[in-house]
Amino acid sequence: MSEKLRVVFFGTAEFAVPSLEALVSAGHEVLAVVTQPDKPKGRGLHPVPSPVKQAALRLGLPIMQPRRVRSESFIETMRQLAPDVLALAAFGQIIPEALLQLPPLGPINVHGSLLPKYRGAAPIQRAIMAGESVTGVSTMWMEPTLDTGDILLAEACPIDPEDTTGTLTKKLADIGARLLVATLEGLKQGTIVRQKQNEAEASYAPPIKPEDAIIRWHESAQAIVNRIRAMNPAPGAVAAIQSKRVKLWRAVPSGQQFEAPEGTIVAFQKSPPGVVVAAGGGTSLALLEVQPESGRRMDAAAWARGVRLKPGDRFEPLQPITG
């Protein structure tokens, strides 16, 4: 087999972009970039290409956007391309057995956790929400089941207390790009040993739903802060006060104890400027950055002055969106 591998890359989200760029930089021949169809967004519902499609256009690579990778026509196209390897990162569809068996070097997935922890669609958000201090990236030999394949390479990454999904995704995406190139080199050289996952240690990271973004004031201050971090940059953690919704973008535990109903504003702090809110177990957190309904992001203290909040005012419960 030649030094340059023939690769079909499957990816959609921003997490996958560095992996695609790394394949090109490493000199591999990217036969096609497979990404999800453009999605309508914004008020005009104009079709918007995925981050991976935008990267592929910039790199001048062939692009395919099948609605279903299970379709026989798409599988036949893949057979004709005859890739050495399929490389996948944050794609968004389950790959069928017929495709997994196609490449001689294997179907390789770049996953944003230390498998078998946080299998599924939202490993980065779920790790932050759970208060983990360490996560990482695994490359895996894909199977038709969800993130259960043999581990090829893995690398740990600390989660800083200030990390959001946005900042952590960037760190893990860069690690994933490096691991993907190293994985392909190891497979080519025959130096990688496949390791079975330990099912007893498996945990799951289901997709983020609208109700996940709703603040639960009965949770501890740290748990609420973790939820806010996990929902940043999308969809944004949401609460309600004065019968209006407000997104919470940045907060820290205040370290102070208050005997007050959960969700009650108990103080305004000067450094850093923030709105201190009572949380579960007598804990409290300081809101630092918010976004009022139909407004822009702003300092929480300035927002509180603008809407004339005072100690004793209380955030209202929001009901999960159903149906």
Image (cartoon, rainbow, N blue to C red):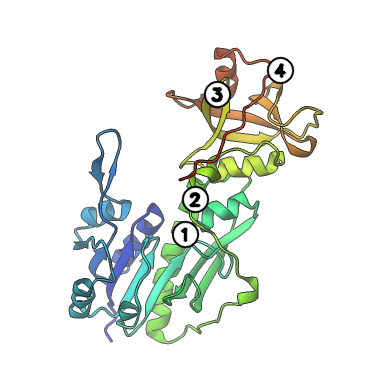
Q: Where is residue 251 in the image (x, y as percent from the top left)?
A: 62, 34
Residue at the limit of the structure toward the front, as seen here: 323
Give the secondary structure at mark 1: loop
Q: Residue 28: which quarter of the image?
A: bottom left
Q: Mark 3 points at which residue?
A: 299
> Amino acid under label 2?
Ile
Separation (CA) of disc 4 from disc 3: 18 Å
Q: Is residue 69 above or below residue 307?
A: below
In this rendering, which labeled residue sits more in front, label 2 or label 3?
A: 2
Give the secondary structure at mark 2: loop
The answer to whether mark 4 and mark 2 are in CB contact below 8 A is: no
Q: Could you tell whether 213 is left or right of 275 in the image?
A: left
Q: Residue at x 47, y 59 (%)?
A: 121
Q: Which residue is drawn at 78% across and 39% down?
A: 281
Q: Could you tell whether 5 is left or right of 94 in the image?
A: left
Q: Where is residue 317 in the image (x, y as percent from the top left)?
A: 61, 32
Q: In the picture, which quadrant includes the C terminus?
A: top left
Label 3 Cα crowd, 10 Å radius (few <14 / some 14-19 / many 20+): some
> Amino acid under label 1?
Ala
Q: Name the residue under label 4.
A: 311
Q: Mark 2 points at which residue?
A: 208
- N-terminal of the two: label 4 or label 1? 1
Separation (CA) of disc 2 from disc 3: 26 Å
Q: Where is residue 13 in the image (x, y as percent from the top left)?
A: 37, 54
Q: In the picture, which quadrant includes the N terminus?
A: bottom left
164 vs 267, nearest the viewer: 267
Q: Is residue 22 above or below residue 212?
A: below
Q: In this view, does 186 lie above or below 204?
A: below
Q: Name the residue under label 1.
A: 121
Label 1 Cα crowd, 10 Å radius (few <14 / some 14-19 / many 20+): many
